[in-house]
Image: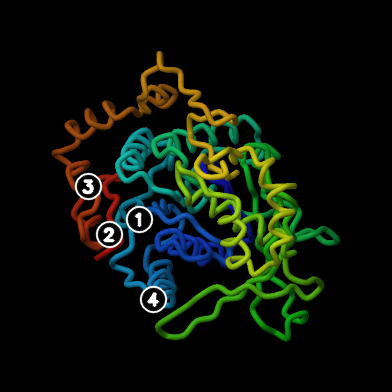
């Protein structure tokens, strides 16, 4: 659904519920629980929020964590926003101090998921209709991702204003480079209440998804009480749920990736996927033979041992499709070698700390357990003053 080691986007009109979706996705990955019925890879999550105050998104995140049976304070969720008492950084993520600090923190916590809300507020000086600006934006996003190899980055964006006789789901606002530079794009729009008995239902469209078979669109709605909340999947008025083959495919990829370096035997994979996706054995075998084996990140290999069983392994960051290590040993394995474009290496960050210690910047531990709002008030200027663990 969202591809790891790549940039992805979720787009929708203002107020449609993208921030709620962001929170649900964040809690899903932080807990390793399914997101909209799809398996997730558990890991730390970093939320970079230029758009909203923390209060409402946090309230929903707390409720959806509780619905899953987890204490919110125990989750590896990390949150950053500009100082709420001052003007936002004029350049957003283009501000050298901001991107330097955030890149350093990404390298520190190694998030599995990076969420940015949203394009317009994170890149206020860029023109979304100009291809060269979008290419530059993706270079900025890459500078974040390379500090946590394999991380999935999801950027929230907007869809164009509605035009008579044109589909609400015609794509993301701006240049086609926005689609060209991402691995997956998702459009969220509101279903006409008259089609769903007046209920508040959102339609989820797969606008683009690389290295995967076509996905069936679906609908989601928010179910909440005063203490818990969750997003649930439901059928669209005009179509049924996604085919079983798609569910089996996603379950197979997630299971292979979870197996680690040792891989997983085909027989064991078939058994697990039939249970996870609730599909028949023949369906799983067909998916493995026709789709999984052709996936660019899946290596089909002999696992050794009795009978020399066939199995599958997820390709590593520096691993070639044949399973060998493609790392160039002559090159230093240093993430800071790739940061020259914005001059925000770790050394630059350390230098900026010494320059800004008098202003309270950079001298607080990442996981300090303080409220973001309280912490921010004690800091000066709009330089990147806090990434605080949302655990208060």
Residues at marks 1 and 2, CA–CA distance in whole angstroms: 8 Å
Farthest right residue in view: 165
To which residue does mark 1 refer? 79
Residue 244 is drawn in which quadrant?
bottom right
Tell me the element at label 1: strand
Query: Disc 4 or 3, which lies upstream in sequence?
Result: 4
Residues at marks 4 and 1, CA–CA distance in whole angstroms: 21 Å
To which residue does mark 2 refer? 372
Query: Disc 3 or 1, which lies upstream in sequence?
Result: 1
Residues at marks 2 and 3, CA–CA distance in whole angstroms: 14 Å
Pointer 1 and pointer 2: residues touching (CB < 8 Å)? yes
Query: Disc 2 or 4, which lies upstream in sequence?
Result: 4
What x and y, as percent, mark residue 370? 21, 61
What x and y, as percent, mark residue 112? 43, 49
Q: Is residue 165 visible?
A: yes
| Quadrant showing the N terminus | bottom right
Of residues 242 and 106, which is closer to you in this image? 242
Please name which of the two marks, 2 or 3, marks the residue nearer to the observer: 2
Residue 69: image tag:
4
Crowding near pointer 4: few (<14 within 10 Å), some, many (20+)? few
Query: Disc 1 or 2, which lies upstream in sequence?
Result: 1
């Amino acid at each position: 659904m969202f591809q790891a080691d790549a940039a992805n986007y979720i787009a929708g009109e203002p107020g449609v519920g993208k921030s709620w979706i962001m929170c649900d996705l964040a809690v899903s990955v932080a807990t390793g629980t399914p997101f909209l019925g799809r398996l997730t890879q558990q890991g730390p999550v970093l939320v970079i929020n230029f758009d909203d105050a923390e209060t409402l998104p946090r309230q929903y995140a707390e409720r959806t964590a509780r619905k899953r049976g987890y204490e919110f304070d125990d989750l590896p969720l990390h949150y950053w926003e500009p100082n709420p008492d001052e003007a936002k950084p004029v350049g957003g993520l283009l501000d050298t101090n901001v991107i330097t600090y955030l890149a350093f923190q990404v390298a520190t916590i190694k998030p599995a998921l990076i969420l940015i809300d949203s394009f317009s507020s994170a890149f206020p000086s860029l023109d979304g209709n100009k291809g060269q600006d979008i290419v530059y934006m993706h270079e900025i996003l890459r500078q974040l991702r390379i500090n946590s190899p394999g991380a999935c980055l999801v950027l929230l964006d907007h869809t164009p204003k509605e035009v008579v006789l044109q589909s609400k789901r015609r794509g993301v606002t701006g240049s086609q480079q926005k689609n060209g530079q991402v691995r997956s794009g998702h459009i969220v729009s509101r279903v006409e209440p008259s089609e769903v008995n007046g209920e508040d239902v959102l339609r989820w469209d797969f606008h683009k998804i690389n290295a995967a078979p076509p996905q069936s669109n679906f609908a989601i709605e928010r179910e909440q009480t005063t203490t818990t909340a969750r997003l649930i999947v439901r059928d669209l008025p005009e179509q049924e749920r996604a085919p079983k083959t798609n569910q089996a495919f996603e379950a197979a990829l997630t299971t292979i990736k979870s197996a680690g370096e040792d891989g997983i035997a085909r027989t064991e994979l078939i058994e697990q996927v039939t249970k996870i996706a609730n599909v028949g054995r023949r369906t799983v075998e067909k998916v493995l033979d026709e789709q999984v084996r052709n996936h660019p990140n899946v290596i089909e290999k002999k696992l050794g041992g009795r009978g020399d069983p066939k199995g599958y392994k997820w390709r590593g960051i520096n691993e070639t499709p044949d399973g060998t290590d493609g790392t160039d040993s002559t090159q230093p394995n240093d993430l800071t070698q790739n940061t020259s474009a914005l001059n925000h290496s770790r050394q630059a960050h350390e230098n900026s700390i010494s320059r800004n210690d008098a202003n309270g910047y950079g001298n607080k531990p990442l996981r300090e357990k303080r409220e973001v709002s309280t912490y921010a008030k004690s800091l000066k200027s709009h330089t990147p003053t806090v990434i605080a663990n949302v655990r208060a």
